[in-house]
Image (cartoon, rainbow, N blue to C red):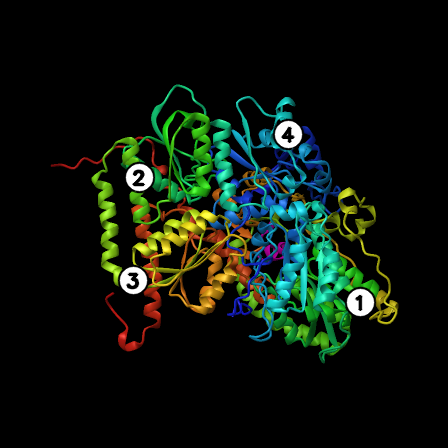
C-alpha cells in the first residue's frame, strides 16, 4: 500500500497538515502573469520559490514556463531585497526584453517587509525601466490564502496598474476567467464570440501555455492579453467575473476605479453554471442566444439522458479549488451523482457555506472541510469509513485511487501524469460533455474490469 | 549527421554568449564559462558556487531543496516535516522520483506523504514554535515514527523559531529521535548549502547510533550520494548481491534509518555524487577511520572500473576474479546493444547542464555511444567538482559559504578504526587507487568543448543555436524550452520518468533511450508539408 499509514480512525488535527489540498500564493500569481502578452513573471524571494513554481507549472503544462527571481541570499534577507530587485529589473529588460515584468512577493520578502512600489520607483529613478516598459506587482505572502488567492491578487494588480477611463464607454465586456486552464479561457472566449459579444479577457494564458511545436522557441509567444487591452478594460460596459476568489478582487477594483459594473458568476462547469453565464451575456449585451449554443447544450443534455443510469447515485469524493469545486459539486448533483466527501485547502467560510447549501438536499449530509487541515489525508480517512465509486481531483489523488481501488478523474491543479487539460476545456457545454465522458470512461472501465464473466456487457 | 563543433570558432562562442549582458553581468559570467584546452595547454580556472545573478534566469533551486528534497527526500522511515508555509512541502512532495522498497508491507514508508505546519500569518507574527510542537505531538500520536526531521523554510529563520530547541524538547517528551535542519531557502547560493546542512545533521544525529556488525560478507560498504532515481539503486543492489558485497547503507537512495545508524560499521565508503555527500565521507573518515574513494556507476565501462576499484581495495584474488567474471558476463549483453545503438548515434553532439555530478557521469554513457559532450556544467557544484579536489586549498570561502556550519570532527576514542594500514593505502595509491580524491569533470572533457557553471536560460539558447546538439540534458524547467527548439531534451534529474540508468542494465536502457530520442520519426514532421511549397502555385482545375 502506498498510503499504508493512513488510519481509518479519525483524530482531530489542528497543527499538522498531511498531503495538502492547496499550495502557496506565489505560484498562482506566476500563472496569472503568464496571461499577459510579453510578460515575464518575477519572483521576489529565494530562487527556490521560482524554481519550484516553474517546475510545477512545467510539469502540469508540458510547456516552457519562463520566470525570473531576485535570488535572495542571507545578506539580502537581512538587509532587504532592494538591491536584488533593482538589479533584476535591469538585467531582465537588457537580456530578455519583455514588455512588462510582473513581480510577486514570497513569504521571505513579505516577512522582511520589502516595499515593492518603493523599490520599483527607485529602479525607475535609476533609469532601469526603459520607456514604454512596465513593472507591476502583487503582494502574495505564502502564509496567507492559497495559490487561488495569489492568482486573484495578480489579476487585481492588472486592474490597479493598467485599467483607465480613456475615450468613454465602449460596447465591450471584460471577461475575467478565473484560475482555469488555457483551454477553458479559449472556450469562454469562444462562447462570447458565439454570443456576438466583443470582449477583453484577462488574464489569458491560451496560446502561451498550450502553444504549438514549431521547432522555434518563443520566449513571449503569441497570446496573452495586451497591455493596451488591459488599459481599455476601464472603458468596457461591464465585467463578467468567473470565480469569487480568483476573479472578484479584480472585478471589484475595476468597478471602484473605473465605474465598470460587474457580474460575479461561478466558473461555468456543468450546464447550470454555463446556463447562467449565457444568460448573463444575454442580459448584459442584449443579444439573443444563437442556435449554435442551443445545439451544444442540447447535445450535452442528450449525452446525460442517454447515460444517466450509469451516473445516478454514484458516490464521489473530490478535492479541488473553491471556484471550481462549487460549480463542480452543483454539476455532479445535477446529473444525479452524490458528492459525499469534499475538501479544499483554500480557506474561506463562504466556500463552505455554499458547499453546504448545494449538498443540503442529498440523502445524507456530505463531509465537507475547507481551509486549515482540510487535506487529502482526511479525505482518504473519510473514504475508508464511507467508500465511494469515484474520485475527482488532482494527480495526488491517484495514491488513494490505487490503494482503495477507486476509479479516478483527473481535474484541477496540478495534473502531472496525463495530458489534455491544456487543450480540451472542462467549462461550457462542450467542456461539460468532456467531463461526462471522462467520468463515464472511468466508471465504465471499472465496471468492465470488475464485472463477473457472466454479466460482462457488450453494449452499455 | 551534422557535427557543428568543427566549424565553430571558439573565441566567437564566448563573445556570443556574453554579448547581450550588461557589463557587470558579462564580467561575472565570463569567469563561469571556460573553454577546455588540449592536455598540454592549461585550462583556465572556473568560477563556481557563487551567487546567482538576480534576474538572470537560472536552473538553480534553494538550500531547502538541497536538504529536504535531495538528501533527506529519499528516506522512507523518517517523517520529514516542513516547518513553514504550505508551498515548500507541497512542491517537494514526491516530485524527485526517489524509489524505495520497504522490507515488508507493514514497514514504515512515509515517502508518499507530505507533512507541513502550513504556517499562517499568525505564526509569522507571534512565532511558529507552538504550532511546530503541536504538529510533532500529532505526528507522534498518529504515526509514532522512529524519527522526525524538521526542515526550516525561509520565514522560520527570519522570525527566529528555534527548531533545534523544539527538536530537543519534543525528543525528550516523545522518545522519538527528532532533529532540525536550518535549511532556510536563502542560505548559501544554491541547493549545495542544503546538502552540507543535511550531511551535518545526519552525521550528528543518526550515524553511529548502532554498533552491531550485521551481515556475513567480508566486503562491507556504504554507497554515498546515490538517490535511487528511477530505480538506479535496485540495479546496483543486484550487482552487489551477485558479488557478495554487503551494502550496509546508502545515503540515501532506498535507505532506512537503521542503515544510517549502522553505517559506521562498513569498511569502505563509495562516493557517487561527490558534491552532495563528500562532507559525510570526510567526517566518517576522520571519526571512524573509514576510507572513501570516488566511483561512478553511470556508464558500463565506468561501472566496471568502479567494481575493479572495490576489488583492488579488498584485495583478495578470488574476489577480484569473481568481479572480472561478472563484468565479462554483463558486458556481453551490454556490448550487443551498445554496438547496435552506437551505429545510429556515433558522431552526434550532446550537452549536459545539470546537478552536481550528473553532468560529469553521463558523459561516460555518451562516450560509449560514440557521442561527444560539447558543453557541460553543473547547476550547484563547486570548483572541486570541475577541477578536482586538488584545488580545494585555493578556494576562498566567501560570506555565503561561511554561513554554513562546518563541523569539527575528531577521532572517536572507542570506535576509530583505520580499515587499512597507511602502508597498504600507499601501496594502493601507487597502483592508481586514490583515496579521498575526485579528479573533477573538466579533465575528462575534450579539447574545444565548454564547461559552463550555472548556465542561464539565455546561454542555453545560444549554445543550442551555435552547436545544434543532437540531444540536450538538463531538468524539467528546461525540458520544453529546448524541445520547442526542435532538439530532443533528456531530463537527468527525473530521467523523464524512465530509468534505471546506473550499472550495466542501466547503460543498456540509456543507449536505447538516446537512440529513440534522437532518431525518432516525429522530428522530421514538425513542419507542415505545405510550408515546404513555394508561396504561389497553380491550383487544380477540374474539367466539368
Q: Secondary structure at mark 3?
A: loop
- Are both tags, 3 and 4, on one chain? yes
Q: Is disc 3 surrounded by few (<14), some (14 to 19) or many (20+) residues within 10 Å?
A: some
Mark 3 or 4, which is nearer the eye?
Answer: 3
Q: Which residues are magenta?
A: B361-372
Dominant secondary structure (helix, strand or loop) of the stretch shown in magenta? helix
Mark 3 or 1, which is nearer the eye?
Answer: 3
> Residues at badges 2 and 1 in contact (C-beta under 8 Å)?
no
Depth order, front residue of B521/B269 = B269
Q: Earlier in the sequence, mark 2 or mark 4?
A: 4
Q: CA distance from mark 2 to mark 1?
A: 70 Å
- Residue ID for mark 3: A312
Query: In the orientation shown, which residue stands out farthest toward the left?
Result: B544
- Residue ID for mark 1: B290
Q: Give the chain letter at badge 4.
A: A
Q: CA distance from mark 2 to mark 4?
A: 41 Å
Amino acid at each position: 500500500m502506498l498510503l499504508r499509514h493512513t488510519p481509518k480512525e479519525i483524530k482531530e488535527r489542528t497543527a499538522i497538515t498531511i498531503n495538502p489540498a492547496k499550495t502557496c500564493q506565489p505560484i498562482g500569481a506566476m500563472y496569472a502573469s503568464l496571461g499577459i502578452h510579453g510578460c515575464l513573471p518575477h519572483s521576489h524571494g529565494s530562487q527556490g520559490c521560482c524554481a519550484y513554481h516553474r517546475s510545477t507549472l512545467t510539469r502540469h503544462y508540458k510547456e516552457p514556463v519562463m520566470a525570473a527571481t531576485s535570488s535572495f541570499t542571507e545578506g539580502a534577507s537581512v538587509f532587504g531585497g532592494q538591491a536584488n530587485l533593482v538589479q533584476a529589473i535591469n538585467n531582465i529588460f537588457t537580456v530578455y526584453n519583455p514588455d512588462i515584468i510582473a513581480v510577486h512577493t514570497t513569504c521571505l520578502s513579505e516577512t522582511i517587509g520589502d516595499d515593492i512600489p518603493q523599490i520599483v520607483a527607485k529602479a525607475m529613478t535609476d533609469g532601469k525601466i526603459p520607456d514604454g516598459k512596465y513593472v507591476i506587482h502583487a503582494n502574495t505572502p505564502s502564509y496567507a490564502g492559497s495559490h487561488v488567492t495569489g492568482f486573484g491578487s495578480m489579476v487585481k494588480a492588472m486592474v490597479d496598474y493598467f485599467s483607465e477611463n480613456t475615450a468613454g464607454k465602449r460596447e465591450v465586456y471584460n471577461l475575467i476567467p478565473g484560475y482555469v486552464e488555457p483551454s477553458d479561457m479559449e472556450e469562454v472566449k469562444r462562447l462570447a464570440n458565439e454570443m456576438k459579444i466583443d470582449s477583453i479577457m484577462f488574464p489569458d494564458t491560451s496560446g502561451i501555455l498550450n502553444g504549438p511545436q514549431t521547432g522555434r522557441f518563443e520566449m513571449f509567444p503569441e497570446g496573452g492579453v495586451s497591455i493596451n487591452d488591459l488599459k481599455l478594460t476601464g472603458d468596457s460596459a461591464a465585467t463578467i467575473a468567473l470565480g469569487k476568489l480568483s476573479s472578484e478582487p479584480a472585478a471589484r477594483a475595476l468597478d471602484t476605479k473605473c465605474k465598470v459594473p460587474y457580474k460575479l458568476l461561478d466558473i461555468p462547469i456543468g450546464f447550470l453554471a454555463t446556463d447562467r453565464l449565457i444568460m448573463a451575456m444575454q442580459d448584459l449585451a442584449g443579444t439573443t442566444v444563437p442556435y449554435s449554443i442551443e445545439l451544444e447544450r442540447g447535445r450535452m443534455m442528450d449525452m446525460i439522458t442517454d447515460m444517466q443510469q450509469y451516473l445516478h447515485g454514484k458516490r464521489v469524493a473530490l478535492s479541488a479549488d473553491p471556484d471550481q469545486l462549487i460549480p463542480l459539486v452543483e454539476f455532479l448533483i445535477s446529473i444525479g451523482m452524490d458528492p459525499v466527501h469534499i475538501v479544499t485547502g483554500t480557506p474561506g467560510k463562504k466556500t463552505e457555506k455554499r458547499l453546504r447549501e448545494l449538498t443540503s438536499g442529498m440523502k445524507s449530509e456530505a463531509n465537507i472541510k475547507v481551509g486549515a487541515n482540510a487535506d487529502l489525508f482526511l479525505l482518504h480517512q473519510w473514504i475508508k469509513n464511507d467508500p465511494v465509486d469515484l474520485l475527482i481531483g488532482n494527480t495526488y489523488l491517484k495514491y488513494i485511487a490505487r490503494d482503495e481501488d477507486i476509479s479516478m478523474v483527473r481535474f484541477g491543479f496540478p495534473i502531472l501524469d496525463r495530458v489534455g487539460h491544456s487543450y480540451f476545456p472542462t467549462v461550457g457545454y462542450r467542456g461539460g460533455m468532456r467531463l461526462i465522458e471522462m467520468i463515464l470512461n472511468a466508471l465504465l472501465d471499472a465496471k468492465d474490469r470488475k464485472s463477473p464473466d457472466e454479466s460482462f456487457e457488450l453494449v452499455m | 549527421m551534422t557535427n557543428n563543433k568543427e566549424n565553430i570558432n571558439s573565441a566567437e562562442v564566448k563573445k556570443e554568449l556574453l554579448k547581450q549582458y550588461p557589463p557587470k553581468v558579462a564580467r561575472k559570467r565570463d569567469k563561469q564559462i571556460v573553454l577546455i584546452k588540449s592536455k598540454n595547454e592549461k585550462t583556465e580556472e572556473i568560477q563556481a558556487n557563487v551567487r546567482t545573478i538576480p534576474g538572470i534566469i537560472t536552473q538553480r533551486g534553494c538550500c531547502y531543496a538541497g536538504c529536504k528534497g535531495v538528501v533527506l527526500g529519499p528516506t522512507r522511515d523518517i517523517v520529514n516535516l516542513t516547518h513553514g508555509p504550505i508551498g515548500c512541502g507541497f512542491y517537494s512532495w514526491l516530485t524527485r522520483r526517489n524509489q524505495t522498497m520497504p522490507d515488508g508491507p507493514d514497514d514504515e514508508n512515509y515517502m508518499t506523504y507530505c507533512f507541513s505546519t502550513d504556517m499562517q500569518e499568525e505564526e509569522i507574527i507571534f512565532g511558529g514554535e507552538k504550532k511546530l510542537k503541536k504538529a510533532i505531538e500529532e505526528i507522534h500520536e498518529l504515526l509514532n515514527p522512529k524519527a522526525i526531521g524538521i526542515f526550516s523554510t525561509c520565514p522560520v529563520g527570519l522570525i527566529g523559531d528555534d527548531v533545534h530547541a523544539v527538536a530537543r524538547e519534543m525528543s525528550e517528551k516523545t522518545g522519538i529521535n527528532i532533529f532540525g535542519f536550518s535549511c532556510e531557502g536563502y542560505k548559501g547560493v544554491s541547493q549545495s548549502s542544503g546538502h552540507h546542512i543535511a550531511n551535518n545533521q545526519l552525521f550528528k544525529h543518526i550515524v553511529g547510533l548502532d554498533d552491531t556488525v550485521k551481515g556475513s560478507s567480508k566486503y562491507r560498504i556504504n554507497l554515498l550520494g546515490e538517490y535511487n532515481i528511477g530505480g538506479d539503486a535496485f540495479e546496483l543492489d543486484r550487482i552487489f548481491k551477485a558479488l557478495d558485497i554487503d551494502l550496509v547503507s546508502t545515503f540515501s537512495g532506498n535507505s532506512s534509518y537503521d542503515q544510517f545508524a549502522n553505517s559506521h560499521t562498513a569498511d569502505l565508503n563509495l562516493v557517487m555524487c561527490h558534491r552532495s555527500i563528500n562532507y559525510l565521507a570526510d567526517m566518517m573518515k576522520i571519526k571512524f577511520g573509514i576510507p572513501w574513494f570516488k566511483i561512478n556507476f553511470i556508464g558500463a565501462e565506468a561501472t566496471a572500473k568502479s567494481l575493479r576499484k572495490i576489488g583492488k581495495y579488498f584485495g583478495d584474488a578470488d574476489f577480484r576474479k569473481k568481479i572480472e567474471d561478472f563484468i565479462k558476463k554483463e558486458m556481453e549483453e551490454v556490448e550487443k546493444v551498445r554496438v547496435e545503438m552506437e551505429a545510429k548515434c556515433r558522431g552526434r553532439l550532446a550537452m549536459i547542464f545539470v546537478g552536481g555530478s550528473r553532468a560529469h557521469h553521463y558523459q561516460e554513457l555518451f562516450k560509449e555511444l560514440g557521442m561527444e559532450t560539447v558543453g557541460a556544467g553543473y547547476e550547484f557544484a563547486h570548483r572541486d567538482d570541475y577541477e578536482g579536489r586538488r584545488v580545494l586549498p585555493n578556494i576562498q570561502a566567501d560570506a555565503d559559504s561561511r554561513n554554513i556550519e562546518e563541523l569539527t570532527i575528531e577521532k572517536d576514542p572507542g570506535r576509530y578504526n583505520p580499515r587499512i594500514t597507511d602502508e597498504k593505502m600507499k601501496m594502493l595509491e601507487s597502483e592508481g587507487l586514490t583515496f579521498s580524491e575526485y579528479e573533477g569533470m573538466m579533465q575528462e572533457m575534450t579539447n574545444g568543448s565548454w564547461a559552463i557553471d550555472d548556465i542561464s536560460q539565455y546561454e542555453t539558447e545560444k549554445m543550442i543555436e551555435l552547436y545544434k546538439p543532437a540531444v540536450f540534458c538538463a531538468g524539467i524547467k528546461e525540458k520544453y524550452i529546448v524541445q520547442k527548439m526542435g532538439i530532443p531534451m533528456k531530463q537527468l534529474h527525473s530521467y523523464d520518468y524512465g530509468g534505471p540508468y546506473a550499472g550495466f542494465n542501466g547503460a543498456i536502457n540509456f543507449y536505447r533511450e538516446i537512440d529513440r530520442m534522437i532518431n525518432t520519426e516525429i522530428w522530421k514532421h514538425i513542419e507542415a508539408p505545405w510550408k515546404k511549397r513555394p508561396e504561389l502555385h497553380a491550383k487544380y482545375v477540374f474539367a466539368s
